[in-house]
Amino acid sequence: MRCVFAGTPDVAAIALRRLLDSSHDVVAVITRPDARAGRGRSLSPSPVATVAQEAGIETIKPTSLRDPDVLHRLREIAPDVAPIVAFGGLVPPEALTIPRHGWVNLHFSLLPRWRGAAPVQHAIWRGDDITGASTFLLEEGLDTGPVFGSVMEEIAPDDTSGALLARLAEVGADLLVDTLDVIEAGTAAPVVQVGDPSMAPKIRTDDARVRWNVPAFAVDRQVRACTPAPGAWTMLGDERVGLGPVEIADPQDFTLAPGEVHVTKRDVLVGTLTDPVLLDRVRPSGKKEMSAADWARGIRLVSGTVLGAQQEAGA
Protein backbone atom coordinates (compact mmCIF):
# COMPACT_ATOMS: atom_id res chain seq x y z
CA MET A 1 0.00 0.00 0.00
CA ARG A 2 0.99 3.63 -0.53
CA CYS A 3 1.74 5.07 2.91
CA VAL A 4 2.24 8.53 4.33
CA PHE A 5 4.05 7.96 7.63
CA ALA A 6 3.73 10.43 10.50
CA GLY A 7 6.06 10.42 13.51
CA THR A 8 8.85 12.31 15.22
CA PRO A 9 11.10 10.68 17.91
CA ASP A 10 13.41 7.66 17.92
CA VAL A 11 10.59 5.17 18.61
CA ALA A 12 8.83 6.38 15.48
CA ALA A 13 12.05 6.16 13.46
CA ILE A 14 12.28 2.46 14.38
CA ALA A 15 8.78 1.90 12.97
CA LEU A 16 9.62 3.87 9.83
CA ARG A 17 12.72 1.78 9.17
CA ARG A 18 10.64 -1.39 9.57
CA LEU A 19 8.07 -0.07 7.09
CA LEU A 20 10.81 0.79 4.61
CA ASP A 21 11.93 -2.85 4.78
CA SER A 22 8.39 -4.12 4.21
CA SER A 23 6.32 -4.57 1.06
CA HIS A 24 4.56 -1.26 1.65
CA ASP A 25 5.54 1.91 -0.19
CA VAL A 26 6.29 4.92 2.02
CA VAL A 27 5.78 7.81 -0.39
CA ALA A 28 6.03 10.70 2.10
CA VAL A 29 6.75 11.40 5.75
CA ILE A 30 5.18 13.98 8.05
CA THR A 31 7.20 15.01 11.11
CA ARG A 32 7.60 17.93 13.48
CA PRO A 33 9.65 20.95 12.41
CA ASP A 34 13.39 20.99 13.14
CA ALA A 35 14.08 21.84 16.79
CA ARG A 36 17.00 23.40 18.60
CA ALA A 37 19.21 20.90 20.43
CA GLY A 38 22.70 20.48 21.85
CA ARG A 39 25.01 23.01 23.44
CA GLY A 40 25.02 25.21 20.37
CA ARG A 41 21.20 25.15 20.21
CA SER A 42 21.38 24.66 16.47
CA LEU A 43 18.36 23.45 14.52
CA SER A 44 18.32 19.67 14.11
CA PRO A 45 15.89 17.43 12.21
CA SER A 46 13.80 14.89 14.10
CA PRO A 47 14.94 11.24 14.09
CA VAL A 48 12.11 10.45 11.65
CA ALA A 49 13.15 13.29 9.34
CA THR A 50 16.71 11.97 9.36
CA VAL A 51 15.59 8.47 8.31
CA ALA A 52 13.32 9.90 5.62
CA GLN A 53 16.04 12.10 4.21
CA GLU A 54 18.50 9.20 4.13
CA ALA A 55 15.91 7.21 2.16
CA GLY A 56 15.19 10.09 -0.22
CA ILE A 57 11.54 10.35 0.82
CA GLU A 58 9.53 13.55 0.60
CA THR A 59 9.47 15.08 4.09
CA ILE A 60 6.73 17.45 5.25
CA LYS A 61 7.37 19.43 8.45
CA PRO A 62 4.20 21.34 9.32
CA THR A 63 3.62 23.38 12.45
CA SER A 64 0.02 22.14 12.19
CA LEU A 65 -1.77 19.53 10.12
CA ARG A 66 -4.54 22.10 9.71
CA ASP A 67 -2.28 24.01 7.32
CA PRO A 68 -4.24 24.20 4.02
CA ASP A 69 -1.06 23.59 2.01
CA VAL A 70 -0.37 20.40 3.97
CA LEU A 71 -3.94 19.16 3.52
CA HIS A 72 -3.74 19.95 -0.20
CA ARG A 73 -0.48 18.00 -0.52
CA LEU A 74 -1.97 15.00 1.30
CA ARG A 75 -4.92 14.99 -1.09
CA GLU A 76 -2.50 15.13 -4.01
CA ILE A 77 -0.56 12.13 -2.68
CA ALA A 78 -3.83 10.24 -2.01
CA PRO A 79 -2.30 7.61 0.30
CA ASP A 80 -3.96 4.28 0.94
CA VAL A 81 -3.14 4.52 4.65
CA ALA A 82 -1.30 6.79 7.07
CA PRO A 83 0.56 4.94 9.84
CA ILE A 84 1.33 7.28 12.74
CA VAL A 85 3.67 6.80 15.71
CA ALA A 86 4.34 9.46 18.37
CA PHE A 87 3.84 12.33 15.93
CA GLY A 88 3.41 14.94 18.67
CA GLY A 89 0.49 16.82 17.15
CA LEU A 90 -3.23 16.45 16.59
CA VAL A 91 -4.65 15.09 13.36
CA PRO A 92 -7.67 17.29 12.53
CA PRO A 93 -10.95 15.85 11.22
CA GLU A 94 -10.31 17.21 7.74
CA ALA A 95 -7.09 15.13 7.55
CA LEU A 96 -8.56 11.94 9.03
CA THR A 97 -10.62 11.22 5.93
CA ILE A 98 -7.86 11.66 3.34
CA PRO A 99 -6.19 8.19 3.45
CA ARG A 100 -8.45 5.51 1.98
CA HIS A 101 -7.96 3.23 5.00
CA GLY A 102 -7.53 6.01 7.55
CA TRP A 103 -4.70 6.68 10.01
CA VAL A 104 -3.34 3.63 11.86
CA ASN A 105 -1.83 4.64 15.19
CA LEU A 106 0.78 2.58 17.04
CA HIS A 107 0.30 3.27 20.75
CA PHE A 108 2.47 1.90 23.55
CA SER A 109 -0.12 0.44 25.90
CA LEU A 110 -2.88 -2.17 25.96
CA LEU A 111 -5.82 0.08 25.17
CA PRO A 112 -8.03 1.29 26.70
CA ARG A 113 -5.50 1.36 29.54
CA TRP A 114 -3.22 4.40 29.48
CA ARG A 115 -4.63 6.57 26.76
CA GLY A 116 -2.57 9.70 26.29
CA ALA A 117 0.95 11.04 25.88
CA ALA A 118 2.88 9.03 28.49
CA PRO A 119 1.52 5.45 28.65
CA VAL A 120 4.84 3.74 29.41
CA GLN A 121 5.70 6.10 32.24
CA HIS A 122 2.29 5.72 33.86
CA ALA A 123 2.36 1.93 33.55
CA ILE A 124 5.61 1.79 35.55
CA TRP A 125 4.60 4.47 38.04
CA ARG A 126 1.30 2.73 38.84
CA GLY A 127 2.94 -0.66 39.30
CA ASP A 128 1.53 -2.55 36.30
CA ASP A 129 3.03 -5.99 35.74
CA ILE A 130 2.05 -6.16 32.06
CA THR A 131 1.81 -3.57 29.32
CA GLY A 132 2.16 -3.74 25.56
CA ALA A 133 1.55 -2.00 22.25
CA SER A 134 -1.64 -1.58 20.25
CA THR A 135 -2.55 -0.50 16.74
CA PHE A 136 -5.87 1.27 16.31
CA LEU A 137 -7.82 3.36 13.84
CA LEU A 138 -7.36 7.01 14.66
CA GLU A 139 -10.51 9.03 15.26
CA GLU A 140 -11.30 12.40 16.82
CA GLY A 141 -11.30 11.10 20.43
CA LEU A 142 -8.03 10.69 22.32
CA ASP A 143 -6.83 7.11 21.58
CA THR A 144 -10.43 5.91 21.45
CA GLY A 145 -10.53 4.18 18.06
CA PRO A 146 -11.13 0.47 17.41
CA VAL A 147 -8.09 -1.76 17.91
CA PHE A 148 -6.58 -3.83 15.09
CA GLY A 149 -4.17 -5.81 17.27
CA SER A 150 -1.91 -5.78 20.30
CA VAL A 151 1.19 -7.40 21.75
CA MET A 152 1.96 -7.88 25.43
CA GLU A 153 5.20 -7.13 27.26
CA GLU A 154 6.14 -7.86 30.86
CA ILE A 155 7.41 -4.98 32.96
CA ALA A 156 10.60 -6.02 34.74
CA PRO A 157 11.17 -4.93 38.36
CA ASP A 158 14.09 -2.74 37.27
CA ASP A 159 12.58 -1.36 34.05
CA THR A 160 12.91 2.35 33.42
CA SER A 161 10.52 3.99 31.02
CA GLY A 162 13.39 4.33 28.55
CA ALA A 163 14.28 0.63 28.65
CA LEU A 164 10.66 -0.52 28.43
CA LEU A 165 9.84 1.88 25.60
CA ALA A 166 12.86 0.64 23.63
CA ARG A 167 11.49 -2.92 23.75
CA LEU A 168 7.96 -1.81 22.91
CA ALA A 169 9.24 0.18 19.94
CA GLU A 170 10.72 -2.99 18.44
CA VAL A 171 7.71 -5.26 18.94
CA GLY A 172 5.37 -2.41 18.08
CA ALA A 173 7.09 -1.82 14.74
CA ASP A 174 6.45 -5.45 13.79
CA LEU A 175 2.84 -5.12 14.93
CA LEU A 176 2.38 -2.03 12.77
CA VAL A 177 3.65 -3.80 9.65
CA ASP A 178 1.45 -6.83 10.41
CA THR A 179 -1.56 -4.51 10.79
CA LEU A 180 -0.94 -2.90 7.41
CA ASP A 181 -0.59 -6.38 5.89
CA VAL A 182 -4.03 -7.45 7.07
CA ILE A 183 -5.59 -4.14 5.98
CA GLU A 184 -4.13 -4.66 2.51
CA ALA A 185 -5.39 -8.23 2.45
CA GLY A 186 -8.89 -7.06 3.36
CA THR A 187 -9.01 -9.20 6.50
CA ALA A 188 -8.63 -6.49 9.14
CA ALA A 189 -11.33 -6.57 11.81
CA PRO A 190 -10.75 -3.74 14.30
CA VAL A 191 -12.51 -4.24 17.62
CA VAL A 192 -14.15 -1.51 19.69
CA GLN A 193 -12.27 -0.86 22.92
CA VAL A 194 -13.87 -2.50 25.95
CA GLY A 195 -13.34 -1.64 29.61
CA ASP A 196 -12.78 1.42 31.72
CA PRO A 197 -10.10 3.67 30.21
CA SER A 198 -7.25 5.14 32.21
CA MET A 199 -5.48 8.32 31.22
CA ALA A 200 -1.73 8.94 30.85
CA PRO A 201 -1.11 12.67 30.54
CA LYS A 202 2.38 14.01 29.90
CA ILE A 203 4.62 13.88 32.97
CA ARG A 204 6.15 17.29 33.52
CA THR A 205 9.25 18.34 35.42
CA ASP A 206 7.30 19.31 38.53
CA ASP A 207 5.62 15.89 38.56
CA ALA A 208 9.07 14.24 38.70
CA ARG A 209 9.94 15.84 42.05
CA VAL A 210 10.46 12.98 44.51
CA ARG A 211 8.47 13.12 47.73
CA TRP A 212 10.12 11.00 50.35
CA ASN A 213 7.09 10.66 52.66
CA VAL A 214 5.71 7.74 50.63
CA PRO A 215 6.64 4.03 50.76
CA ALA A 216 9.96 2.97 49.25
CA PHE A 217 8.26 1.06 46.42
CA ALA A 218 6.48 4.27 45.37
CA VAL A 219 9.77 6.20 45.25
CA ASP A 220 11.33 3.39 43.20
CA ARG A 221 8.44 3.37 40.70
CA GLN A 222 8.41 7.14 40.34
CA VAL A 223 12.13 7.43 39.68
CA ARG A 224 12.11 4.57 37.13
CA ALA A 225 9.04 6.03 35.41
CA CYS A 226 10.76 9.40 35.06
CA THR A 227 14.02 7.92 33.70
CA PRO A 228 15.27 9.22 31.36
CA ALA A 229 12.64 11.93 30.91
CA PRO A 230 11.73 14.23 32.47
CA GLY A 231 14.20 12.97 35.09
CA ALA A 232 13.42 12.51 38.80
CA TRP A 233 14.87 15.08 41.17
CA THR A 234 15.02 16.32 44.74
CA MET A 235 16.42 19.33 46.55
CA LEU A 236 19.48 19.61 48.77
CA GLY A 237 19.12 23.03 50.30
CA ASP A 238 18.77 25.40 47.35
CA GLU A 239 20.29 22.97 44.82
CA ARG A 240 18.33 20.64 42.58
CA VAL A 241 19.80 17.13 42.36
CA GLY A 242 18.76 14.75 39.60
CA LEU A 243 18.23 11.12 40.59
CA GLY A 244 18.78 7.91 38.66
CA PRO A 245 16.99 4.68 39.59
CA VAL A 246 17.21 3.74 43.26
CA GLU A 247 17.34 0.38 45.03
CA ILE A 248 15.13 -0.51 47.97
CA ALA A 249 17.54 -1.30 50.79
CA ASP A 250 17.28 -4.10 53.31
CA PRO A 251 15.81 -3.07 56.65
CA GLN A 252 18.43 -1.24 58.73
CA ASP A 253 19.23 -1.37 62.44
CA PHE A 254 18.47 2.35 62.58
CA THR A 255 15.50 4.47 61.53
CA LEU A 256 15.56 7.20 58.90
CA ALA A 257 12.88 9.86 58.63
CA PRO A 258 11.53 10.57 55.13
CA GLY A 259 14.26 12.34 53.18
CA GLU A 260 16.88 11.84 55.88
CA VAL A 261 20.28 10.76 54.57
CA HIS A 262 22.65 8.15 56.00
CA VAL A 263 26.13 8.23 54.46
CA THR A 264 28.76 5.46 54.54
CA LYS A 265 31.99 5.12 52.59
CA ARG A 266 30.20 3.22 49.82
CA ASP A 267 26.51 4.04 50.11
CA VAL A 268 24.04 6.88 50.38
CA LEU A 269 20.71 5.84 51.88
CA VAL A 270 17.62 8.03 52.02
CA GLY A 271 14.65 7.45 54.30
CA THR A 272 11.10 6.97 53.05
CA LEU A 273 7.83 6.20 54.79
CA THR A 274 8.98 2.56 54.97
CA ASP A 275 12.43 1.15 54.14
CA PRO A 276 15.28 3.40 53.00
CA VAL A 277 16.44 3.47 49.40
CA LEU A 278 19.98 3.40 48.05
CA LEU A 279 20.93 6.16 45.65
CA ASP A 280 22.91 5.01 42.62
CA ARG A 281 23.57 7.82 40.13
CA VAL A 282 22.92 11.50 40.76
CA ARG A 283 23.28 14.64 38.67
CA PRO A 284 24.07 17.79 40.68
CA SER A 285 22.86 21.02 39.14
CA GLY A 286 25.17 22.12 36.34
CA LYS A 287 27.39 19.04 36.60
CA LYS A 288 27.75 15.64 34.98
CA GLU A 289 26.12 12.50 36.31
CA MET A 290 28.19 10.70 38.95
CA SER A 291 27.88 7.96 41.56
CA ALA A 292 26.03 8.91 44.72
CA ALA A 293 29.10 7.96 46.79
CA ASP A 294 31.38 10.30 44.80
CA TRP A 295 28.79 13.06 45.04
CA ALA A 296 28.51 12.64 48.81
CA ARG A 297 32.28 12.72 49.26
CA GLY A 298 32.67 15.75 47.01
CA ILE A 299 30.18 17.90 48.91
CA ARG A 300 30.99 16.32 52.31
CA LEU A 301 27.42 15.18 52.78
CA VAL A 302 26.81 14.12 56.36
CA SER A 303 24.30 11.74 57.88
CA GLY A 304 21.22 13.46 59.16
CA THR A 305 20.93 15.83 56.21
CA VAL A 306 17.38 15.94 54.88
CA LEU A 307 16.65 15.97 51.15
CA GLY A 308 13.63 17.82 49.85
CA ALA A 309 13.06 19.59 53.16
CA GLN A 310 12.10 22.92 51.56
CA GLN A 311 9.81 21.20 49.08
CA GLU A 312 7.95 19.25 51.73
CA ALA A 313 7.56 22.40 53.83
CA GLY A 314 6.01 24.20 50.85
CA ALA A 315 3.83 21.30 49.69
Image (cartoon, helix red, strand yellow):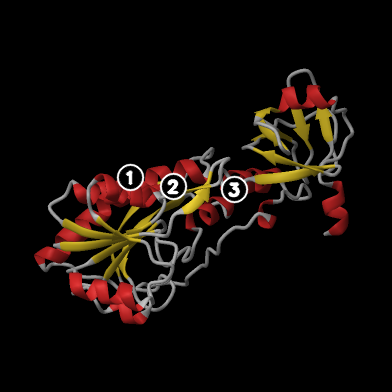
Task: Say few, some or many: other residues with alpha carbon within 10 Å of mark 1 (under 14 / 14 to 19 / 20 or more).
Answer: some
Q: Where residue 53 sits in the image (x, y, percent)?
A: 28, 49
Q: Are marks 3 and 2 in contact (CB under 8 Å)?
A: no
Amino acid type shown at disc 3: Cys
| Residue labelled with disc 1 | 170
Q: Residue furthest left?
A: 185
Identify the residue at image location x=22%, y=76%. 75
Disc 3 to disc 1, C-alpha distance = 21 Å
Q: Locate residue 7 relative to residue 44 in the image: left or right.
A: left
Give the mark nearer the N terminus: 3 vs 1: 1
Dot 3: element: loop
Disc 2 to disc 1, C-alpha distance = 9 Å
Give the mark nearer the N terminus: 2 vs 1: 2
Disc 3 to disc 2, C-alpha distance = 12 Å
Q: Where residue 280 sits in the image (x, y, percent)?
A: 66, 30
| Residue labelled with disc 3 | 226
Q: Are marks 3 and 1 in contact (CB under 8 Å)?
A: no
Dot 1: element: helix
| Residue labelled with disc 2 | 165
Quadrant of the image for the N terminus? bottom left
Residue 39, label in figure: none
